[in-house]
Image (spheres, rainbow, N blue to C red):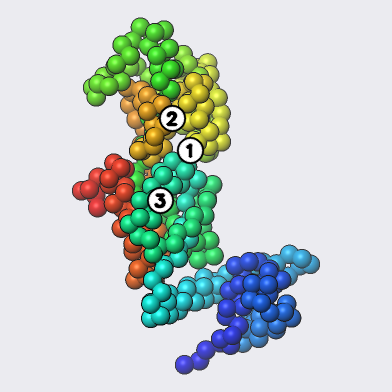
Amino acid sequence: MKLPPLKALPVFEAVARLNSFSLAAEELAVGQSAVSHQIKLLETYLGEPLFIRTGRYLALTDEGRQYFDAVSTALLQIERASEQLLGHETARLRLSVFSSFAVRWLVPRLPVLQKQWPQLDLSLEMSGGNPQLSDRVADCFITVRPDSSAFSYELLYTERLFPVCSQQYWQTLCREQEIDPALHLSPRASIHPSLLAAYPLLSTHSIYNRAGGDWAAWFDAGGEPLPKGSRLQHFSHMLLALEAARYHQGIALTNDYMLSNRADSADFVRLPCHHLMTGDQFFFAWKTSRRHEPGIQILRRWLLDQSIESGLRHAAQA
């Protein structure tokens, strides 16, 4: 078996993860010259530069990035295998997750996870957009792009958007439009989409990456264009639009997980209108080569159970 300089591998992993020779030296409790020496040994052995150095700027080369993905996974597997043999049952995982999914759905459920699986040490990495599937970023992910053949995926949620407003705003709307305030409680009741255009529409830019794209798509799904003269108020993120709706500023489009089992969900009224399927599906993703790690399988099963229990996914889909 022909192996590279083994002492250099943890050094390389630290430099690549921290993007710094000095920080890696501090973490490993060695001198920076020792770190540089190990990296040079490894590059000489491989015959490839692993880092691009320009002044204070440090970055992985394409070859270095590929090597880091493989090496970091291998070192993690060695660490976990050793912990199992030593009887250390704690499983440490980093989960990269969308900020809205984390704040509105996952974080409120973490006490349940901690109670059921105290040996699982989970840390969250917040992601504003779809995360890069790489061990450099996290051990597992919530993603809407199941496009890496190196990963396995578990469906958690198929997204749909529907209009909501605050309880107070609904009462105002009903009074002005002469609507029965209890109408939203009837599963077959419906109000015409054009009625909503008389009120401020709180729009989330990040859903369709264009101004008013969410409301334009919602009206189109109802068979008509976004009415001219609609008053759109723009927000970068659904969390912000939902907060504006909470404070009686208009009508927002949101999805199921934003209102799922939260104590403040009763602050909102789901308007009796059609919903819009965005085409996005949320998956729990993990590297297939790490599929046997107990921590990943515990988290996968728990997330699936929670998605079914909260109504995000039907049991028949599991």
Task: Please tell me which residue is depicted at 51% across the width and 21% down the height of the picture.
Answer: 249
The residue furthest bottom is 1
Badge 2 element:
strand
Q: Mark 1: which amino acid?
A: Ile
Indicate which disc residue 253 carries. Answer: 2
Q: Mark 2: which amino acid?
A: Leu
Where is residue 174 drawn, in percent x and y?
Answer: 37, 11
Where is residue 313 drawn, in percent x and y?
Answer: 29, 45
Where is residue 207 drawn, in percent x and y?
Answer: 48, 38
Relative to residue 157, is residue 188 depicted above or below? Answer: above
Residue matched to label 1: 207
Task: Please tell me which residue is depicted at 41% across the width and 74% down the height of the picture.
Answer: 88
Q: Which of marks 2 and 1 is nearer the N terminus?
A: 1
Distance between the alpha carbons at the discs numbered 2 and 3: 26 Å
In the rendered structure, the answer to whether residue 19 lies left or right of residue 71 reads: right
Distance between the alpha carbons at the discs numbered 1 and 3: 26 Å
Residue 28 shows in the view: yes
Residue matched to label 3: 110
| Quadrant assignment, res 225 | top left
Residue 63 shows in the view: no
Mark 2 vs mark 3: in front: 3
Mark 2 vs mark 1: in front: 2
Would you say the residues marked 2 and 1 are in contact, meaning their CB atoms lie under 8 Å apart?
A: yes
Q: Mark 3: which amino acid?
A: Leu
Task: Please tell me which residue is depicted at 44% across the width and 41% down the height of the picture.
Answer: 104
Relative to residue 83, is residue 237 depicted above or below? Answer: above
Badge 1 element:
helix
Q: Earlier in the sequence, mark 2 or mark 3?
A: 3
Q: Earlier in the sequence, mark 1 or mark 3?
A: 3
Badge 3 element:
helix
